[in-house]
Image (cartoon, grey):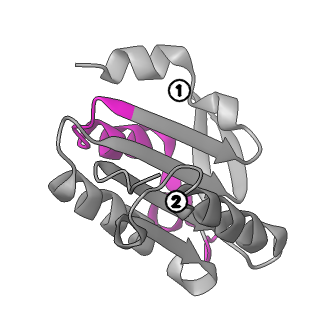
Amino acid sequence: MSEFQQGHALVIGVGADLQNTVVDAKGIADVIRNPELCAYPANQVTVLTEGQATRKGILDELDAMASQVMPESTVVFYFSGHGYTVNAGFGKQYFLMPNGYNMEDLINTAISSSEFMSKLQNIKAQKMLVLLDCCYAGGIDNEEVKAKAP
């Protein structure tokens, strides 16, 4: 099988108290790059683990992907780590919890579902697979996805 030139992936394993997330992320990345399986070019598969998998690191890579990906591209996004939900006066808010999050400052250290969806919307690929291996992944539900769809 030849390389799939239009394949791009961002694979995240936050580590810290969930060391299995690093192993999972590296395993997923190996499958995506494997020429006999997905055959994505190795230089188009970004893996962030441990100290690289911070809020800034993840958001910067999503922005970079948005600038590199073409409509005919296929994108895989994989996140393995904690998810969190907050019951606020205006309803529930969901977060992806990157490496280095602070429970006292979620807005500045975690990634809200609305911010995450906005970053995904900036990626113009017609085909995108989003895999969230975390608690409360269902918090990014169909209603939010429909509201953000073009």
Of labels 1 and 2, earlier in sequence is 2
Tell which of 14 and 11 is nearer to you. Answer: 11
Q: Amino acid at mark 2?
A: Pro
In the rendered image, the residue lying farthest to the bottom is 51
Q: Residue shown at 21%/37% (left/top)?
A: 124
Q: Residue shown at 64%/44% (left/top)?
A: 132
Residue 59: where, in percent of width, then height? 37, 62
Is residue 61 visible in the rendered image? The answer is yes
Whether the residues at callouts 1 and 2 have beta carbons within 8 Å, the answer is no
Residue 56: where, in percent of width, then height? 40, 72
Q: Residue shown at 49%/55% (left/top)?
A: 111
Tell which of 3 and 145 is nearer to you. Answer: 3
Q: Quadrant of the C terminus?
A: top left
User: What SS does tag 2 mark?
Assistant: loop
Within the image, what quadrant is residue 128 found in?
top left
Is residue 103 visible in the rendered image? The answer is no
Q: Amino acid at mark 1?
A: Phe
Tell me the residue that label 1 is attached to: 90
Within the image, what quadrant is residue 8 found in?
bottom left
**Above/below status of 24 relative to 43:** above
Tell me the residue that label 2 is attached to: 35
Q: CA distance from mark 1 to mark 2?
A: 47 Å
- The magenta region covers 99-127
Q: Is residue 107 magenta?
A: yes
Residue 146: where, in percent of width, then height? 39, 14
What's the mark number on residue 1? none
Residue 76 is left or right of residue 66, and the answer is right
Tell which of 150 and 115 is nearer to you. Answer: 150
Residue 80 is left or right of residue 76, and the answer is right
